[in-house]
Image (spheres, grey):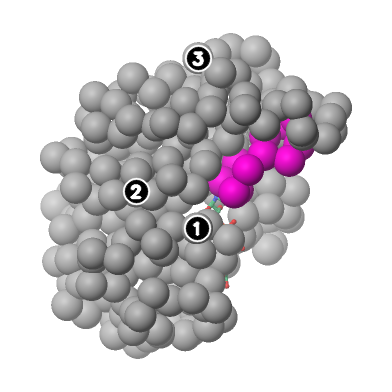
Amino acid sequence: MLLTGAAGSVGQQLLPGLTGFGLRVLDRAAPDEAGGAEVVVGELTDRDLLARAVSGVDAVVHLAGDPRPDAEWDDLEGPNVDGFAALLGAAREHGMRRVVYASSVHAMGRYESAGRFPIDPTWAPAPCCAYGATKAFDEALAGVHAAHGGPSTIGLRLGATVERPTQSSQLTGWLGPEDLRRLVVAALEADVTSGVYPGVSANTRNRWDLTAARRDLGYEPRLDSEVFAGDVEDDGRAVTTCVL
Ligand SMILES: NC(=O)c1ccc[n+]([C@@H]2O[C@H](COP(=O)([O-])OP(=O)(O)OC[C@H]3O[C@@H](n4cnc5c(N)ncnc54)[C@H](O)[C@@H]3O)[C@@H](O)[C@H]2O)c1
């Protein structure tokens, strides 16, 4: 299995959950921890490097990208759009079985701002920022590949994926490390051709409808941000996505 973006924050939290998978990792930076995996260092848009990275691999967990909701389009386009398109093309060419990729709750952020929840993953994408729009595009392109004989694609709309919430805005959409690992492994193994699912823990203040994730992926989150609610800094926001 290939993990992209392994050197990043989510990749480092996820790695301990992938020990049984025979792992290769790809990142433009060498990861601090690679769990004994073969490491490929370079850019997603380098076709030769990508071909080497996907060769002989049955599935990929794709995290490489720019995670900043306030980033400008010029910074997002390369990693989040061109990079993902290149990865999907390589996965298809090499007959890969499954692509599990990091989308974001920001692809549906306008619903959270408008107070429309629980947010149903089948509603039309409603990004709250250019970052969310790149993720909505990724979901659309992944669906095209899956529908036209390419790899099966599962998008995970990750929430605030941190060890523990430290700000009030993370309480609605926190995804804790053990739930992240459960969710990704479930997405790798589920009997699903294509889909997009929210990636959040079982938070008391949750705004994302997890019915389909439970049904299709067998994802059973166990963590709740509420246990940290008394310790977080009040950042004046009650939503995990952008305030509009
Ligand atoms: N951190 C969160 O709370 C969060 C929430 C929702 C979605 N996500 C998504 O999860 C993924 C990982 O986020 P993160 O917080 O770990 O980000 P990060 O910036 O910590 O890590 C991303 C990694 O991807 C690598 N990378 C970026 N562009 C690359 C390219 N073109 N080629 C090769 N490597 C490249 C970087 O070197 C980095 O190590 C992103 O797609 C992000 O949008 C993260």
Residue 184, labelled with which disc? 2
Quarter where residue 37 is shown = bottom left
Residue 118, labelled with which disc? 3
| Three-letter amino acid code at the position of disc 2 | Val
Residue 191, labelled with which disc? none
Circle nearer the N terminus (3, 2): 3
| Three-letter amino acid code at the position of disc 1 | Gln
* Residue in view at x 59 percent, y 49 percent: 163
Per the image, label 2 sits on a secondary structure element best described as helix
Q: Nearer the viewer, residue 54 or 18?
A: 18
Q: Is mark 3 within 8 Å of ligand 1?
A: no
Per the image, label 3 sits on a secondary structure element best described as loop
| Three-letter amino acid code at the position of disc 3 | Pro
Q: Nearer the viewer, residue 53 or 47?
A: 53
* Residue in view at x 33 percent, y 19 percent: 211
Q: Is residue 179 visible?
A: yes
Q: Quadrant of ligand 1?
A: bottom right
Q: Is residue 50 visible?
A: no
* Residue in view at x 47 percent, y 69 percent: 6
Question: On the picture, is 32 further left or further right than 242?
Answer: left
What's the CA distance linking mark 3 and mark 2? 22 Å
Q: Is mark 1 within 8 Å of ligand 1?
A: yes
- Disc 3, disc 2: CB below 8 Å? no
What's the CA distance linking mark 1 and mark 3? 27 Å
Look at the image and give the residue range highlighted in magenta: 160-170
Q: Position of residue 77 (x, y in %)?
A: 59, 61
Q: Nearer the viewer, residue 237 or 232?
A: 232
Residue 13, labelled with which disc? 1
Would you place residue 156 above or below residue 27 in this image?
above
Quarter where residue 190 is shown = top left
